[in-house]
Structures are given as C-alpha cells and as structure tokens.
Amino acid sequence: MPKIIPNLWFDTQGKEAAEFYCSVFPNSKIKTVTYYNEAGPRPAGTVLTVEFELDGQEYLALNGGPEFTFSEAISLMIDCADQDEIDYYWAKLSEGGEEGPCGWLKDKYGLSWQVAPGGMAEMLNDPDQERAARAMKAMFGMKKIDIAALQAAADQA
C-alpha cells in the first residue's frame, strides 16, 4: 500500500514551521531539506521542501509561494490522552495563532488543528441521546476542550 504523506503549502516559512512542529511533538525530526537551484522560480539556495516527521507521521512542507493558503477545510487532529496533553498542545499551537470553537485553533502559520480528548466521539455518540446532547451543547460552548466540564455536562440529569 502506498504511503500517504500530507503536503503542506507555505509561502516561505516551510522550514521554520517544520522546526516549530518538531519542537512541539515528541519523537519528531527534520529528515531532508531540498533547495531551489538555478532552474527554480525562486532564488537558488532558498528552501523548496522540508520532509519532516511528527511522532512517526511523515509530512512535507513546500515553499511554493503566496498563491495558496490554509483554510479550515482541512485540519490536523491531535487525539489527546488527558487534560494535560490538551493544555500543552493548545498552549503551544495557539501561541501567535487564533483560538477557535470546539477544540479548533489556527497556529501562527495558519494551519488548523483540532486538540481533542480521546473518547470524545463516544461521549457525543452516547446511546443515551440526552446525555450526548448535553455533552455536545457543552462542547459547542468551549474553545479549548475541558474534559471535566464536558463530562460534568454529560452526567447532569
């Protein structure tokens, strides 16, 4: 089966972004940096691509120019084990970016992330429809997800 590697288009900040993401996520590294040469549309010696890995998942950052920018139509989801992980990733990734609703944020490069607790889908799909509705209503009122508040809302009778 072929590998699927997300390709992230940046104007000129691909290497800076890859270094930032590698500093945020454990077991991450820059693998390869490729540079434009005389044949490229950008000056020779400037960064073309950066292959990097975030905890085992490969990505490619492309410095392709200002023609395309990120939108919320695609995001990277972080399945967090607990509130400490949510707090950590939320703080790191939202710094210089923009907080959004329901655990979504844009980082300082404009890339959208979802910082969510593992098991949230189960709570929102609870067979007890009233419990699921209370959890969903609570989630829609949050920016950063608060697991304890979500659970309390779901458990309210």
Image (tube, grey):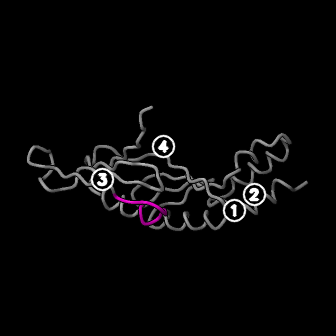
Q: Are marks 2 and 1 in contact (CB under 8 Å)?
A: yes
Badge 3: how crowded within 10 Å, few (<14), some, or many (20+)? many
The residue singled out by tag 1 in the image is 146
Q: Amino acid at mark 1?
A: Asp
Element class at badge 4: loop
Distance from disc 2 to disc 3, alpha carbons, whole Å, reads 38 Å
Task: Decide which of tag 2 and tag 4 comes sooner along the chain.
Answer: 4
For the residues labelled 2 and 1, the Cα–Cα distance comes to: 6 Å
The amino acid type found where label 3 is placed reads: Val
**On residue 110, which mark appears?**
none
Q: Give me the C-alpha separation between circle 1 and circle 4.
A: 23 Å
Image coordinates of residue 53 in percent, x first then y, are: 41, 54
- SS type, badge 2: helix
Kindly identify the residue that appears in the image at 45 percent across and 59 percent down.
107
Does residue 111 appear to the left or right of 131 in the view shown? left
Residue at (66% x, 55% y) in the render: 117
Within 10 Å of disc 1 (Cα), the crowding (few <14, some 14-19, many 20+) is many
Residue 67 vs residue 41, the one in the foreground:
41
User: Looking at the image, is mark 1 or mark 4 earlier in the sequence?
Assistant: 4
Please rate how many residues cluster around mark 2, counting C-alpha atoms within 10 Å: few if below 14, some from 14 to 19, many from 20: many
Residue to which mark 3 is pinned: 50
Q: Mark 4: which amino acid? A: Ile
Q: Is residue 38 above or below residue 86?
A: above
Q: CA distance from mark 2 to mark 4?
A: 25 Å
| Callout 2 touching callout 4 (CB < 8 Å) | no
For the C terminus, give its image quadrant.
bottom right
- Give the SS element for disc 3: strand
For residue 24: magenta? yes
Q: What is the magenta range?
A: 22-30
Q: Which residue position holds label 4?
A: 74
Residue located beneath label 2 in the image: 150
Is tag 2's residue or tag 3's residue first in the polypeptide sequence?
3
